[in-house]
Image: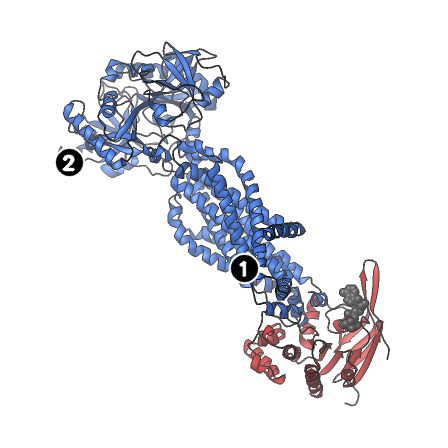
Chain colours: A blue, B red
């Protein structure tokens, strides 16, 4: 133990003696470990950690499907929720959930609140403990029970300033006085980002007889907890059996031609979403950064060791235990990596908010991102590992004492033993840097292509207001129409609104409706034939003009296209091409109900990338809003001023028309586009940051190692000059040797890319993962920059006075 | 050809070092002529400027003042490139510290000077091997310097010094790191080289070795004593 302390003291002393190198090593470690800890905090908390709920691994969501109607995950009716609750033998607990927007009165201005509506057991089963008051108790979701509210942590902090005396507060909502009974801790924004929570008894729709008893009204989500020891498969079998029994019992509600099935999905999977690939890619790139950092530090250690080789040989010759010397080096580099690790954590900590924001684009578990004990442990282990790794390179480099002593006698220049090892490490750094640089170049080019992708519509000065009409108030087509007509009339009256339309969807909308089956008249399909599918959107007269979607044949919709006129459609170019040979689609007819009703094609419009900038348009057609109404109303405005300025005014108009109607969102089309681009952009930024980090560390390594090599080779350079080497020859020799390493590194990097590209390709848009230009440019950049880094020490070497150089040790 | 041809002509040569406001006059107003084929020994007390003189002669160092003429070239105005070329063509060195490059094999060390002039690889190897034969070290051509004894290393260094067939071989205490047997062998070698026509200028402390030269020069405080 004593000798360990001595080692540490020695390490510290030698560190403080060589401040510049030690600082360089510590900073290198700090950047590498910091980057890894930050990404790991995301990977761990989102992908690896158990869900932040009680028995998180047993939590499931129940999905119901109509397989024959190709309707998936359609939600559950209140009655079927009760059925599963009573009959399931696999689930110990079953909870219901849905989310609504209501207006809350009682303090300050009325606010629209996203409200989670749950069965009483929701919080107790998830094991969520309130920070104030209590959660719902048994019976409090029975119809007629007292209206109660539980506040989310965010809402409580922001809207009620974290008031400690909030319990018992009376708030009015849906014409009823609600009492606040609890405040939640911060929890993941799952299933939705709810401001407040009420029990099923408080939702005015959930309590309606027509809803409760209507089995085709699939308005709730069903969650459950598997009994201990029951697998997901067994659970699925159980609920699917129940579904089968229900279908037999209620043939009207579950018609046979649509089919009816149920299954369970693990809540963990559901909450993680499709984020895993992105996070693992980032972690592996961060891992490469730390490898580069380790190689770099190992290299600096080797260089320092080389300069001490004679001293060490003398010590050993005098009887020092060689293991002791090796241990000393390990102690020193581990000390550095630990200090670097602490610094790295300090650097990573402020970036967590940013990373959590980033992760929220992928998963609701982003709220869990933070520095907890697992992340700290990871950083500790990583620090120790990098310290040992970079310190042990020095051990492999141990050499024959006799050789060292002989060479030390200054008759022969020291063979730069360990030179090969040092150069290999540099090659590894070049290879990894190339991989990261190329990856970030690929991702950046891909982002650029996405960014500049023509989506087929003009997002400029367009405002989108999303309204999901309360189905209880808008049960008939007439009611919807009255509302949308008045809405269009009112917003069109605003001077700065040039055009207004309502539609069922808009491009790049996140919750796009699935495609429908259709057939053309010419196909003359039988009732059993498989029908092709296309995306359909209902759209009012000016929809295409608002988005500036070019008309290519025929006409656009007008206000005379309604339920009294002949049924018409506008198809996109792709559909015209695929089904009508492109040029003669006008007048042709299609049906979406197996030939019962026929829609005549009156126009062909340009393709729009509706499902995402990265997805080319498939077959799509538009139906006049007034011929096929929807309760999903998207009001779109083309404005003559910045649409941002109209947001409030438009929201006010909607509220005045129907104070009960929630506005799901009000965004400019630019914002929609930006939101869509946000995730790819952040991936590009993060990879770019890591690329820059890797590049800086590698360059620091190149400069350090080359400078060190030159300093070790001063005498050799003197000898060469004495036999006639000109400064140019010396410079070129050093640069060529450096360039050789770079080129070998590039070659290895190139080879490594072939393993990585399949993964990267997933993230790329219209970018060849083997794009020769990108590879070429990255190679040239790396080569030029590394040569530039080597130029300074090489230039210095040429300034040596040969007679001084020969004299030097 | 009775009249000896001067190979080296120094005229009022000075080499001063300035350090921390202190000026060391390593060489001061030195006049010296070395003729082709001569074997000159330089001796004198430690610090009198012997090594400095050899560095100046070998164009490893610049002068502070005075004229230096080497084989007809006025060296004073030469830039680093011209000096390097001249060195490469005209001068061979043997150092007290043998100064072999540890990363290169014996034969590669000997080839080194040729690699800086336009000599084909094949010819380089042939000439290097010939000189190694000459110093009796051909059998160790592919060894590394650290695998050789001190005397062997110095013989390799001599081979490197003469591989370009220099106008003059400059040797700075070539026996300083050797035992008497090995030292005698090296001196024997130098004698033979001189007999074959190589001009030699050697710094030595050892009177016995100095006596073997055709001319003895003594240095004191940077100036010739006789
Ligand atoms: N680069 C230098 N900077 C400053 N002073 C120097 C330098 N080189 C030599 N000197 C000084 O010049 C003087 C002559 O040095 P030199 O090496 O020529 O002596 P020497 O005769 O070879 O001695 P020795 O027999 O010990 O080798 C000494 O006083 C030395 O300190
Ligand atoms: Mg000397």
Residue at which label 1 appears: A395
For the residues carrying marks 1 and 2, which lies nearer the camera in this image? 1
Q: Is residue A181 left or right of residue A570?
A: right
Residue at left offset 50%, top offset 17%: A163
Can residue A231 be seen from the camera position used here? yes
- Closer to the chain start, of discs 1 and 2, is 1
Residue at left offset 14%, top offset 26%: A248
Residue B8 percent location from the top left of the image: 77, 78
The CA span between labels 1 and 2 is: 74 Å
Q: Is residue A779 above or below residue B94?
A: above
Location of ligand 1 given as a quarter of the image: bottom right
Residue A598 percent location from the top left of the image: 19, 27
Q: Is residue A733 above or below residue A95?
A: below
Q: Nearer the viewer, residue B189 or A15?
A: A15
Residue at which label 2 appears: A529
Q: In this view, does A556 lie above or below A678?
A: above
Q: Is residue A29 left or right of residue A454?
A: right
Tag 2, which secondary structure? loop
Q: Is residue B85 above or below residue A682?
A: below
């Amino acid at each position: 133990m004593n000798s360990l302390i001595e080692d540490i003291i020695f390490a510290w002393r030698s560190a403080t003696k060589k401040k510049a190198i030690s600082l360089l090593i510590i900073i290198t470690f700090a950047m590498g470990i910091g980057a890894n800890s930050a990404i790991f905090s995301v990977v761990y908390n989102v992908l690896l950690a158990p869900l932040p709920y009680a028995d998180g691994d047993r939590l499931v969501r129940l999905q119901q499907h109509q397989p024959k109607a190709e309707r998936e995950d359609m939600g559950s009716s209140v009655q079927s929720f009760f059925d599963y609750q009573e009959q399931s033998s696999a689930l110990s607990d079953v909870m219901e959930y849905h989310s609504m927007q209501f207006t809350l009165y009682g303090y300050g201005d009325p606010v629209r609140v996203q409200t989670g509506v749950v069965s009483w057991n929701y919080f107790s089963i998830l094991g969520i403990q309130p920070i104030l008051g209590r959660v719902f108790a048994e019976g409090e979701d029975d119809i007629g029970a007292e209206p109660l509210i539980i506040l989310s942590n965010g809402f409580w902090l922001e809207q009620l300033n974290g008031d400690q005396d909030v319990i018992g507060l009376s708030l009015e909502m849906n014409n009823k006085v609600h009492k606040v009974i609890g405040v939640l801790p911060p929890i993941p924004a799952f299933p939705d980002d709810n401001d407040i929570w009420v029990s099923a008894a408080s939702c005015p729709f959930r309590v309606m007889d027509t809803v409760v008893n209507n089995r085709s009204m699939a308005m709730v989500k069903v969650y459950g907890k598997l009994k201990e020891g029951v697998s997901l498969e067994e659970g699925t079998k159980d609920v699917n059996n129940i579904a089968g029994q229900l279908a037999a019992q209620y043939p009207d509600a579950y018609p046979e031609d649509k089919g009816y099935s149920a299954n369970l999905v693990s809540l963990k999977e559901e909450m993680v979403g499709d984020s895993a690939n992105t996070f693992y890619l980032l972690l592996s790139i961060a891992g490469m950064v730390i490898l580069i950092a380790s190689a770099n530090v190992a290299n600096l250690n080797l260089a320092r060791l080389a300069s001490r080789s004679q001293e060490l040989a003398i010590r050993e010759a005098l009887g020092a235990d060689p293991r002791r010397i090796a241990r000393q080096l390990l102690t020193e580099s581990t000390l550095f990596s630990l200090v670097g690790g602490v610094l790295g954590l300090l650097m990573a900590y402020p970036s967590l908010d940013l990373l959590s924001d980033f992760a929220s684009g992928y998963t609701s578990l982003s709220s869990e991102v933070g520095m907890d004990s697992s992340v700290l442990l990871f950083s500790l282990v990583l620090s120790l590992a990098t310290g040992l790794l970079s310190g042990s390179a020095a051990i492999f480099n141990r050499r024959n004492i006799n050789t060292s002593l002989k060479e030390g006698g200054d008759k022969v220049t020291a063979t730069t033993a360990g030179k090969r090892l040092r150069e290999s490490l540099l090659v590894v750094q070049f290879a990894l840097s190339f991989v990261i640089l190329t990856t970030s170049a690929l991702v950046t080019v891909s982002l650029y292509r996405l960014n500049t992708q023509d989506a087929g519509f003009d997002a400029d000065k367009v405002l989108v207001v999303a309204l999901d009409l309360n189905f209880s108030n808008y049960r008939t087509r007439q009611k919807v129409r009255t509302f949308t007509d008045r809405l269009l009339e009112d917003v069109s009256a605003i001077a700065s609104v040039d055009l207004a339309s309502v539609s069922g969807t808009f491009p790049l909308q996140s919750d796009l409706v699935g495609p429908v089956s259709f057939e053309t008249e010419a196909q003359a399909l039988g009732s059993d034939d498989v029908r092709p599918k296309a995306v359909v959107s209902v759209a009012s007269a000016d929809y295409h003009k608002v988005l500036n979607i070019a008309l290519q044949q025929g006409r656009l919709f007008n206000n005379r296209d309604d339920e009294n006129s002949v049924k018409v459609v506008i198809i996109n170019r792709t559909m015209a091409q695929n089904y009508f040979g492109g040029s003669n689609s006008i007048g042709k007819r299609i049906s979406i109900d197996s030939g019962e009703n026929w829609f005549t094609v009156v126009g062909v419009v340009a393709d729009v990338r509706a499902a995402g900038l990265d997805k080319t348009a498939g077959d799509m057609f538009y139906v006049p809003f007034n011929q096929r109404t929807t309760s999903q109303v998207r009001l779109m405005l083309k404005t003559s001023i910045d649409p941002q300025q109209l947001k409030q005014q438009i929201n006010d108009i909607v509220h005045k028309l129907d104070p009960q109607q929630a506005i799901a969102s009000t965004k400019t089309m630019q914002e929609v586009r930006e939101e869509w681009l946000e995730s790819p952009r952040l991936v590009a930024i993060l990879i770019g940051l890591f690329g820059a980090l890797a590049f800086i560390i590698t360059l620091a390594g190149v400069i350090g190692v080359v400078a060190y090599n030159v300093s070790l080779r001063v005498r050799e350079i003197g000898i060469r000059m004495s036999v006639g080497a000109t400064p140019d020859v010396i410079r070129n020799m050093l640069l060529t040797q450096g360039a050789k390493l770079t080129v070998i590194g590039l070659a290895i990097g190139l080879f490594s890319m072939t393993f990585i590209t399949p993964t990267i390709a997933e993230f790329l848009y219209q970018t060849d993962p083997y794009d020769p230009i990108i590879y070429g440019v990255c190679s040239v950049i790396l080569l030029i920059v590394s040569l530039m880094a080597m130029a300074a020490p090489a230039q210095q070497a040429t300034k040596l006075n040969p007679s001084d150089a020969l004299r030097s040790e | 050809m009775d009249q000896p041809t001067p190979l080296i002509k120094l005229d009022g040569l000075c080499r001063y070092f300035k350090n921390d406001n202190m000026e060391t006059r390593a060489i001061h107003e030195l006049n010296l002529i070395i003729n082709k084929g001569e074997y000159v020994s330089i001796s004198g007390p430690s610090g009198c400027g012997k090594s400095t003189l050899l560095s100046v002669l070998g164009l490893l160092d610049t002068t502070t003042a005075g004229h230096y003429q080497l084989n007809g070239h006025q060296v004073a105005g030469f830039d680093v490139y011209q000096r390097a070329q001249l060195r490469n063509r005209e001068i061979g060195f043997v150092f007290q510290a043998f100064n072999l490059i540890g990363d290169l094999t014996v034969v590669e060390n000997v080839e080194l000077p040729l690699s800086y002039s336009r000599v084909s690889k094949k010819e380089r190897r042939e000439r290097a091997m010939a000189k190694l034969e000459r110093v009796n070290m051909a059998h160790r051509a592919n060894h590394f310097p650290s695998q050789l004894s001190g005397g062997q290393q110095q013989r390799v260094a001599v081979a490197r010094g003469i591989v370009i067939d220099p106008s003059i071989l400059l040797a700075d205490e070539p026996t300083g790191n050797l035992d008497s047997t090995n030292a005698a062998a090296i001196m024997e070698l130098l004698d033979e080289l001189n007999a074959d026509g190589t001009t030699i200028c050697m710094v030595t402390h050892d009177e016995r070795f100095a006596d073997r030269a055709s001319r003895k020069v003594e240095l004191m405080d940077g100036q010739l004593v006789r």
